[in-house]
Image (cartoon, rainbow, N blue to C red):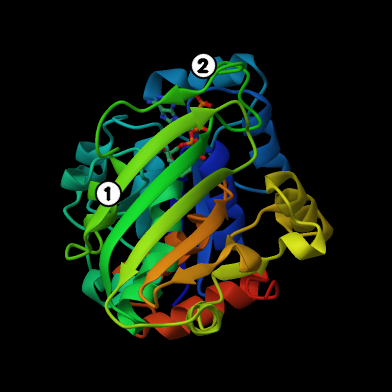
Amino acid sequence: MTAKIAINGYGTIGKRVADAVAAQDDMRVVGVAKARPDFEAKMAIRKGFALYAANPDAGTKFEKAGVKVSGALDDLARAADLVVDCTPEDSGYKPLYEKAGIKAIWQGGEEHSLTNLSFNAAANYEECLGAKFVRVPSCNTTGLIRTLYPLDDQLGVTDVLAVMVRRATDPGDSKKGPINAVEPELEMPSHHGPDVQSVLPKLNIHTIALKVPTTIMHVHALAVDLKRATTEDAVLDVWKRFPRVAFVSGADGVRSTAQIMELARDLSRNRADLYEIAVWRDGVHVTGGKRLFYFQAVHQESDVVPENIDAIRSMLEIQKDGRKSMEKTDQSLGIGIVK
Ligand SMILES: NC(=O)c1ccc[n+]([C@@H]2O[C@H](COP(=O)([O-])OP(=O)(O)OC[C@H]3O[C@@H](n4cnc5c(N)ncnc54)[C@H](OP(=O)(O)O)[C@@H]3O)[C@@H](O)[C@H]2O)c1
C-alpha cells in the first residue's frame, strides 16, 4: 500500500516533511495546503505538489496571484489517509480532520493535550501504532529525548538538568528577535521538561531556557545523574547505536554551531539539513562515575522530520516494528553517516 499523505502548512517544517514523504516508497504526497499565495506556494507547484488553499475563501486570492490551486483544504483532507499539520500553533484544524475522518499528526507548537499521545520513534513507536491523532514534540524536546532515552534505557537516569540556549528564530524569518539581547525564559521549569515527560513520563528532568540572537541552531548543556557507574567511552558507545545521534569534535575544528552547519552543508543534503542531534564527543565528561555532562546542538528546522515519517508508518501500521521504520527513514534521508 502507498499511503496518501496531505501536508497542511507548507512553511519551515511542512516543506521539509513534504520532501521527506516524497522520498519514501510506501507513502506519497497527495497535496499541500497553504494560507497565502507567496513564493513558497509557487515553489510547491514547481516541485510538482498539488497546492490547496488552507482557507476556502482564499481561492480567489490565489487565483488573483496567478497561483493555481487544486481545491480547498477539506478537498485535500478527503483525498488523504493522514494529514501532517504543520501550521502555526492553535490553528484549530482538528474539527476539519475529524469531519473528514482522517488521521492527523501535529507539531510541537501544540499542547500534548490536543492528542494525548506524543511521539518519538526510538522511545514509543509501538505505543502509537494505529493511533488516530499524534503530536511530534518540538525540536528542543525531540533533541532532548534523542540523547536521554538511550541513556535512560541503557544506564538508567535519576536526574537531568538541561540548560537550553535557544535560537531566536528560523533563518527565513525577519520578524522575530531578539537581535541584540539574551532573553531568559522566566517560567521554571521551562515548558521543555514537562514536554519531554509527555513521551518519557518517568524521567526526572528540569529545564532552563534562554533565547539568544542566532538563527541556525539550539545548543543544550546537560548534567545527568546516572543509576549505573560509567565512563565517557561507554556513554559514546550507547549513543553510537542510535543513528539519529551524530558526533562532532572540537579537536577537529568544530568549535561552534557555525562549523556544525558548515559540516551539514558539506554533506550536500536537501537544504543542508542536519536531522541528527550533534553531540560534541570531546564535550562528554563523567565525574565520580555517575554524573555525566555533555553539550548537544539541535538543527531546529529538521530534527523532527524523520520523526514525522515514522509517526506516519506507526499510525497507519505500514510497519509494526519501529526499528525497521527508522532504518528505512534513515536510509532515505542519508541519516547515520556522521559518526
Ligand atoms: N520552525 C521550527 O524550527 C520548528 C521546529 C519544530 C517544530 N515546529 C512546529 O511546527 C509547526 C509549524 O511551524 P513552522 O515553523 O513550520 O511555521 P511556519 O514556517 O510559519 O509555516 C506555517 C505554515 O502554515 C500555513 N498556515 C495554514 N493555516 C494557517 C493559519 N490558519 N494561520 C497561519 N498560517 C497557516 C502557513 O501558510 P502561509 O505562509 O501561507 O500563511 C505556512 O505555510 C508549529 O507547531 C511549530 O511550533 C517548528
Circles 2, 1 touching at the beta carbon (< 8 Å): no
**Mark 1 surroundings: few (<14), some (14-19) or many (≥20) residues within 10 A:** some
Give how far apart the Cα atoms at labels 2 and 1 are: 49 Å
Q: Which residue is mark 1?
A: 206
Q: Which quarter shows the N terminus?
A: bottom left
Residue mark closest to the camera, 2 vs 1 = 1
**Mark 2 surroundings: few (<14), some (14-19) or many (≥20) residues within 10 A:** few
In this view, the residue in front, 105 or 67, is 105
Numbered label attached to residue 48: none
For residue 295, say whether it is visible: yes
Instruction: State the image coordinates of residue 99 (x, y, percent, origin top left).
Output: 19, 43
- Label 2 secondary element: helix
Instruction: State the image coordinates of residue 158 (x, y, percent, origin top left).
Output: 24, 68
Q: Is residue 57 above or below residue 266?
A: above
Q: Is residue 100 above or below residue 81?
A: above
Using residue 332 as the reference point, say whether residue 78 is left or right of it.
Answer: left
Instruction: State the image coordinates of residue 321 (x, y, percent, origin top left).
Output: 36, 85
Using residue 167 as the reference point, say whether residue 39 is left or right of it.
Answer: right
Residue type at mark 2: give it. Answer: Thr
Q: Which quarter shows the C terminus?
A: bottom right
Residue type at mark 1: give it. Answer: His
Residue at 33% from the left image edge and 52% from the top image edge: 161
Q: Which residue is mark 2?
A: 60
Residue at 31% from the left image edge and 83% from the top image edge: 228
- Label 1 secondary element: strand
Instruction: State the image coordinates of residue 187 (x, y, percent, origin top left).
Output: 26, 29
Residue at 44% from the left image edge and 32% from the top image edge: 210
Quadrant assignment, res 113? top left
For residue 23, say whether it is visible: no
Mark 2 or mark 1: whose residue is earlier in sequence: 2
Q: Is residue 216 above or below residue 267?
A: above
